[in-house]
Image (cartoon, helix red, strand yellow):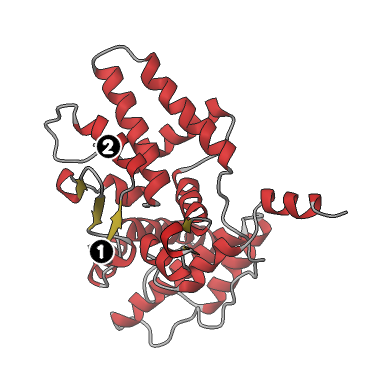
Amino acid sequence: MSVYDSFRAWLADQGRSRQTIRAYTSDLKHFADWFNQTNGQALTPNNLTAIDAREYKQWLLQQKAAPATINRRLIALRIFADFAISQGHISTNPLTNIKPIKQQALRPRWLEKTQQAALLRESEKSINAASAGDRRARATRDHAIVVFLLHTGLRVAELCALVRSDVQIGKRSGAVNVRDGKGGKARRVPVNAAARDALRAWVLIPSQSDSMFGVQPRQVEKLIAELGRRAGVAVTPHTLRHTFARNMRNTLIAHKGRHVTLEELAALLGHEKISTTVRYELPGEADLQQAVEAME
């Protein structure tokens, strides 16, 4: 078994998601290529040193890698070192004193209301332009995906993993069961009227697949990017998740006279820590524009 296979198996035993395992393995391979070119030997669990980690970090800086990329790859190395310790190859983690690149806290990027409307308009236009048959079915599915992401805040991997029995649609309520969220955590997310209407149109089309949408993450990314291009909006599936969160944070629960709380939003998004959810308190461009326009 190769070192990558062993590392993947160990990560799976730790309860890491498939997406996380792929990301860590990809970052490890990037480091292994650098290690081989620099040291003239293959990376193994027992020849990782702090000097290698420091030099790799410095090399990434020289390559002008983004701070987030550098930090992510250092995290992958730190996890690999934990794996090496667990297997008895090394006794201490050589990444312990390797500091991440400091970054300024930035708000997530979300779509303003006009941008959301432009994206949905393009999605609806695709249905209107499609002839009957497979093209119309695909356009209906794609519209349901956009509306569903925008109104549930699911991660793209969570959406792609859904089967039809995970989604319940009633006349006045609905919900989706996320069986394997980030960190292996399950949650139940309510589905509002807009998402229910889009889903009904899709599920009325016969399908032999048990998959709710029958797509892979890369397909969803390409779909959203193309709709965004036509709408003149830079957008990804994760942008729609951020947009859902911002919309929810601004939502007033009329019969209770209050806004959605951070705790409620964290539960909807599947955040383990409120500190992650607090980012949606940061102002967006429209908020700042309104602030300066208010000056007399």
Q: Which mark is residue 199?
A: 2
Q: Which mark is residue 177?
A: none
Crowd around label 2: few <14 · some 14–19 · many ≥20 (10 Å): many
Camera-side residue of 192 and 265: 192
Q: Work out whether mark 2 precedes mark 1 in sequence or the reverse, and give the earlier one.
A: 1
Q: Nearer the viewer, mark 2 or mark 1?
A: 2
Camera-side residue of 132 and 14: 132
Residue 87 in the image, given as x and y percentages of width and height: 28, 79
Q: Is residue 20 above or below residue 117?
A: below
**Residue reaching furthest to the left:** 208
Camera-side residue of 227 and 80: 227
Helix, strand or loop status at disc 2: helix
Quarter of the rendering containing residue 113: top right
Residue lying at 15% horizontally and 30% vertically, measured from the top left: 207
Residue lying at 41% horizontally and 32% vertically, measured from the top left: 223
Q: Is residue 124 above or below residue 75?
A: above
Q: Is residue 181 above or below residue 238?
A: below
**Residue reaching furthest to the bottom:** 91
Residue 67 in the image, given as x and y percentages of width and height: 62, 61
Quarter of the rendering containing residue 195: top left
- Check the picture and name the quadrant holding the N terminus: bottom left
Query: Amino acid type of disc 1?
Result: Ala
**Relative to 169, is 114 on the left or the right?**
right
Residue lying at 38% horizontally and 83% vertically, measured from the top left: 90
Quarter of the rendering containing residue 80: bottom left
- Check the picture and name the quadrant holding the C terminus: bottom right
Query: Amino acid type of disc 2?
Result: Leu
Residue 203 in the image, given as x and y percentages of width and height: 20, 33
**Alpha carbons under labels 2 and 1: distance apart:** 21 Å
Helix, strand or loop status at disc 1: loop
How many marks can you see? 2
Location of mark 1 (residue): 186
